Image (cartoon, rainbow, N blue to C red):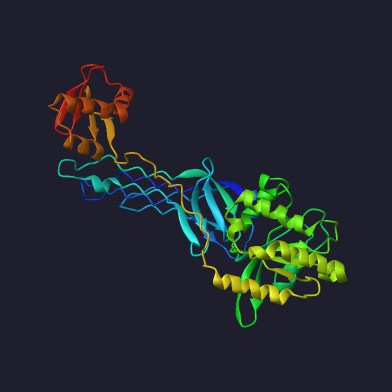
Amino acid sequence: MFADRAKIRIRSGKGGDGHVSFRREKYVANGGPDGGDGGRGGDLIFEVDPGINTLNEFRYNRKYFAGDGEPGGKRRCHGADGKDMIIKVPAGTIIREASSGQVITDMSYENTREIVLKGGNGGKGNQHYATPTMQVPKYAQPGKPGIEMEVLLELKSIADVGLVGFPNAGKSTFLSRVTNARPKIANYPFTTLNPNLGVVDLEGTDGFIIADIPGLIEGASEGVGLGHEFLRHIERTRVIIHMVDAASTEGRNPLEDIRIINRELEAYNPNITKRPQVIAANKIDCFYGEEKEAVLSELKKEFEPEGILVFPISAVTGEGVRELLYHVKKILQETKDETVIFEKEYRIKEPDFADEPYTVTKSEKEEGLYLVEGPRIERMLGYTNLDSEKGFEFFQKFLKTNGILEELERLGIEEGDTVKMYGWQFEYFR
């Protein structure tokens, strides 16, 4: 089964927490802080693998999580970094944020490896927080959390030329003749199920990549059959070869088939029909004489005034195929080489939270005394004028929004008790 869409959940690793510890050595009565830093969380990375061309793997495995960083240890030991998670995808895969559908990144052309979610930084150990006024810091920085989200993977094949047409027009036979691709060939009642890519090698010039877009049907642009599943693969192509069963071996009208397919392409994406087109009038080995001349004449009369040349070919015998391929190569050389890259629309935001540590403790030496310490508290006191009414209002709000009041109440603080923050002391009232 071919898969070109998948929804998966991804997450980068959490940073390890910093450690709180103190030197305990012989002959060292009061050792300083020696808590180590936490390890960095692993990154979530997408990488193009030229050996795969479908998203089949993601039908079975839908969760991809990078490793968490390990916490720091005693004696300044640094926690190990988390292991990166590398997700292999085929070239041409677009990664979208699931709920909005916005593009996070397009894994195409030069973009073969990208860190989509960065791992959280490890927290600093208490060794970093020793100051002349706080020589025994009992707090450490927590590791930053990883980022978790759901994404959509969407494969849009990368090819110079798109091969379109109704089922059984002979596209698979043509592709197997002109490239190294080996699609399954049979008289399918509906369509080949797999978009096939192949490289056309031409003598005396560079070749090009061609994509066989599975047989389209009327209503494909509205999702009839597997329309949307296949139309996305033509969005990057620069030239379109429109293959038609000129011999009407299944009773279809060649002119009407071309009109129907073009209407479907325009309904899906109007820009597609503005690209150069060539008509491959296939199966000319299946009819002869006046009937053959009449059909080819009608096709040329209808489309060549629009600059769309008609090439009579036989994918089975090879008649006319060489001329068609060299004409397509000429168009590619004359048209501007514009690679279709889907621009980033969604910016991933890192978790927004204050990661500087603090502690709220009850004094073991003095009854009714509570200590609030840490870099976050020290920083706040440094830029707050507690002598002003507005400054004191901000201070009270800071205590509430940062959970400090809640923590004091959890420890059993009562009215009239004292809260000490460095050089400041406050009496607690509800």
Image x and y of residue 388, in percent: 13, 26
In which quarter of the view is residue 305 placed?
A: bottom right
- Residue name at image x 58 percent, y 64 percent: 238
* Apparent side of residue 427 relative to residue 249 in the rendered image (left or right): left
- Compared to residue 369, the image places residue 259 above or below, namely below
Image x and y of residue 411, in percent: 31, 24
- Residue name at image x 22 percent, y 28 percent: 394
- Residue name at image x 54 percent, y 61 percent: 48
* Apparent side of residue 20 relative to residue 307 in the rendered image (left or right): left
* Apparent side of residue 172 relative to residue 339 in the rendered image (left or right): right
* Apparent side of residue 277 relative to residue 41 in the rendered image (left or right): right
Quadrant for the N terminus in the image: bottom right
| Nearer-the-camera pick, 164 or 411 | 164
| Nearer-the-camera pick, 301 or 197 | 301
Image x and y of residue 33, in percent: 25, 46
Q: Is residue 369 visible?
A: yes
- Compared to residue 65, the image places residue 297 above or below, namely below
- Residue lying farthest left? 387
Quadrant for the C terminus in the image: top left
